[in-house]
């Protein structure tokens, strides 16, 4: 017990009712002061949260990153004041009362919705409904996988989630609960804030779903309790902890519980209660203290909770110190990939430059992954039911199965959004580097969670194959057009579109080294030649040319008359166009391969200028033009897609949509002459 806690020691026992009322008061006062926020949910779930934290959860605010801590995810992120009040009460050092008084203000730790990295102990960013519960599935899976590798003496914790009606209505929850039930993620315990209210009013306006039946059908252990009956909640948590399946505890609650006039109404969902109702609530719940004042005895009781987690942490640290797995465990949790991975990729590049290997970049990715996965076991792969199209599995990767978590390949099922969220959870949990595949076109389905990978700065690698009309016969439903623009517009996301096997290996290296940023590898279905021989100097170099985002692949002997810029499968087209311009028209054309816009933007102006040159520019990419004007400038041209694709063999489509060396050469000639 620290000295501050000792000074606060209570004379009489404090009830859980008082502890919960502290949350209610802090929530309604903070929202009132900010004149913005959501008091209803924290007030309604205050009793459940109090029982969970006071009797069960193992966290240590003085060591918030302790690897074997229980995870807490506030999926109903609009109720952020619940989390902030808890953090203050528990004694997280960065969550002082001033932070609650600056709720939702610029630069405070108390952002509108909980944001990973803004305050200690926030395990994931939530707010987009359904993301939290789905991310938590990844955390609970990572826990099982890490336990399978390192043993229960090092890894043995629960993932607790508070989800609202909104989280359960969102489609992503269906993907997540199905996956969790199937995989029997028994350490996942979800509390449903079953208050039957959302923004528009009663949930009966829009749903008749029997949620417990839905969870049961997905293989969950399901209980229903009165969320204000603390003993019932505690008993349900105990039962959930014993279950061999993930658990739903449906907690019947009253939104805005404690507010005498507004409690139970959607009016408490997302607006301050107002001075009169706050005064009436104080009276109603017997809270005779000023705003932001929590009496010492109640605060002491909350702070004492940390002792349980601290003791658990100390015991765990002793087990770790004595464990033969210590080194392996620590390096896994640190996320450090061994040098062997990058040495293997270097050797891989040298070999395939020499062999001039011609394969689809999806195949090149599979081959590169073969080298990566043989050099480390931190990578865990998967696909949304397109394993043999995305080529994401490599030799010796066993599948993760219910009750068998020792493998490293996850069959995510046809659940792109759930897969992306689960990968976020795996990355956040620590111990693994997740990658997962689908078709680029279905980035749309995964988008909500991809955005959070970027916002949270997580090393998640998206392997997105079938990247253009080049996929051919499947037609426009499967041919991405606008997706590159959408992904490139997303901040803190590296979008790689490699042109050949060498760039593919380079881009994989960059993705794995990018610890604070997710990556998308955009890969072709069709074969692509090895293009490095087009370089005027040594084709192989130890240097990773893709690391600067763009580089000169072909520099003509004469002063450049035009610069052709391309990515992925269209770099080959640009190279052919440059050769024709030279031989047929005597025009000196440079070719720039630009596998990653984001990395190119980060280079200094001199480098960018040296690559782009001062001659007119033509960009070629079998996708929408949006964004390319940045690189071709006012006087440039673009050869690409202006609408949706079509169903036909790929070579026919390239001709039909006029994405050919002839078209590129013609566009160049038009600019020059
Ligand atoms: C994906 C997404 N859609 C819409 C919203 C806007 N929104 C925030 S809270 C909410 C209603 C949530 O209802 P519920 O989970 O029952 O919360 P309660 O009103 O019970 O606090 C909505 C629609 C959102 N945050 N995320
Ligand atoms: Mg609700």
Image (tube, rainbow, N blue to C red):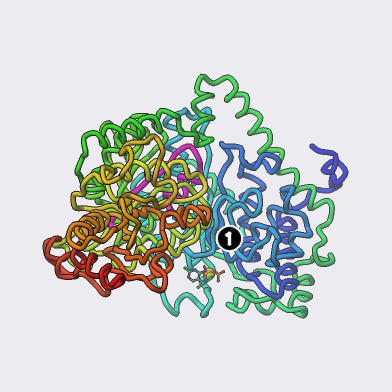
Q: Position of residue 394 (x, y in %)?
A: 27, 36
Which residues lie in the magenta part? 421-439
Q: Which residue is mark 1?
A: 227
Q: Is residue 218 visible?
A: no
652 relative to 370 in the view: left or right: left
Disc 1 crowd, CA 10 A, few/some/many (<14, 14-19, 20+): many
Q: Is residue 362 above or below residue 331?
A: below
Residue 530 in the figure: left or right of residue 86: left
Quarter holding residue 372: top left
* Residue 587 at x, y percent in the picture: 26, 61
Element class at badge 1:
loop
State the image quarter where residue 382 is shown.
top left
Residue 423 painted magenta: yes
Q: Residue at x 53, y 59 (%)?
A: 75
Question: In the image, residue 204 lies at what x, y percent?
Answer: 45, 77
Give the answer, above or below, for where 74 lies relative to 63. Answer: below
Residue 379 seen: yes
């Amino acid at each position: 017990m620290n000295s501050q806690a000792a000074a606060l020691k209570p004379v009489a026992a404090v009830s859980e009712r008082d502890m919960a009322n502290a949350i209610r008061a802090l929530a309604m006062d903070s929202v009132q002061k900010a004149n913005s926020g959501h008091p209803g949910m924290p007030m309604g779930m205050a009793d459940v949260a109090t029982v969970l934290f006071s009797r069960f959860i193992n966290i240590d605010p003085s060591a918030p990153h302790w690897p074997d801590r229980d995870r807490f995810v506030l999926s109903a992120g609009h109720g952020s004041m619940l989390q902030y009040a808890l953090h203050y009460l528990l004694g997280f050092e960065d969550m002082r009362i001033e932070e609650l008084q600056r709720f939702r203000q610029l630069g405070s730790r108390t952002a509108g919705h909980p944001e990973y990295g803004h305050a200690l102990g926030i395990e994931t960013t939530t707010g987009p409904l359904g993301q939290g519960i789905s991310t938590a599935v990844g955390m609970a899976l990572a826990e099982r996988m890490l336990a399978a590798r390192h043993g229960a003496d090092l890894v043995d914790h629960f993932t607790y989630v508070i989800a609202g009606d909104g989280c359960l209505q969102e489609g992503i929850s269906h993907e997540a609960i199905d996956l969790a039930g199937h995989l029997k993620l028994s350490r996942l315990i979800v509390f449903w804030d079953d208050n039957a209210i959302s923004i528009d009013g009663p949930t009966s306006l829009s749903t008749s779903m029997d949620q417990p039946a839905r969870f049961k059908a997905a293989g969950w252990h399901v209980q229903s309790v009165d969320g204000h009956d603390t003993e019932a909640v505690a008993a349900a948590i105990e039962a959930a902890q014993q279950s061999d399946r993930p658990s739903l505890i449906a907690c019947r609650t009253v939104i805005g519980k404690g507010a005498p006039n507004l409690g139970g109404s959607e009016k408490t969902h997302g607006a301050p209660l107002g001075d009169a109702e706050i005064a009436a609530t104080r009276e109603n719940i017997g809270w005779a203290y000023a705003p932001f004042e929590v009496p010492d005895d109640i605060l002491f009781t909350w702070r004492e909770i940390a002792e349980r987690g601290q003791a658990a942490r100390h015991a765990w640290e002793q087990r770790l110190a004595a464990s033969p797995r210590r080194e392996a465990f620590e390096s896994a949790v640190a996320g450090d990939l061994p040098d062997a991975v990058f040495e293997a990729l270097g050797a891989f590049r040298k070999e395939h430059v020499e062999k001039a290997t011609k394969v689809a970049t999806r195949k090149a990715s599979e081959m590169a992954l073969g080298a990566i996965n043989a050099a480390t076991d931190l990578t865990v792969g998967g696909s949304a039911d397109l394993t043999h199209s995305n080529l994401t599995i490599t030799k010796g990767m066993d599948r993760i199965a219910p009750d068998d978590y020792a493998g490293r390949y996850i069959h995510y099922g046809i659940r792109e959004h759930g897969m992306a969220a689960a990968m976020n959870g795996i990355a956040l949990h620590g111990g693994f580097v997740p990658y997962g595949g689908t078709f680029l076109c279905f980035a749309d389905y995964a988008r909500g969670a991809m955005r959070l990978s970027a916002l949270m700065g997580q090393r998640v690698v998206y392997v997105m194959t079938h990247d253009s009309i080049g996929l051919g016969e499947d037609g426009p439903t499967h041919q991405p057009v606008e997706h590159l623009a959408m992904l490139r517009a997303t901040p803190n996301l590296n979008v790689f579109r490699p042109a050949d096997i060498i760039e593919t290996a380079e881009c994989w290296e960059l993705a794995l080294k990018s610890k604070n940023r997710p990556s998308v590898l955009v890969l072709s279905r069709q074969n692509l030649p090895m293009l490095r021989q087009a370089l005027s100097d040594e084709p192989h170099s130890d240097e990773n040319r893709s690391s600067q985002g763009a580089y000169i692949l072909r520099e003509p002997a004469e002063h450049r008359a035009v610069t052709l810029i391309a990515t992925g499968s269209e770099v080959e087209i640009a190279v052919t166009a440059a050769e024709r311009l030279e031989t047929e028209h005597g025009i000196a054309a440079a070719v720039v391969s630009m596998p990653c816009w984001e990395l190119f933007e980060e280079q200094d102006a001199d480098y960018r200028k040296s690559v782009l040159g001062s001659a007119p520019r033509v960009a070629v990419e079998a996708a929408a033009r949006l964004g390319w004007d940045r690189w071709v400038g006012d006087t440039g041209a673009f050869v690409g897609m202006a609408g949706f694709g079509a169903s036909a063999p790929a070579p026919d489509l390239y001709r039909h949509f006029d994405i050919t060396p002839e078209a590129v050469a013609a566009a160049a000639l038009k600019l020059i002459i």
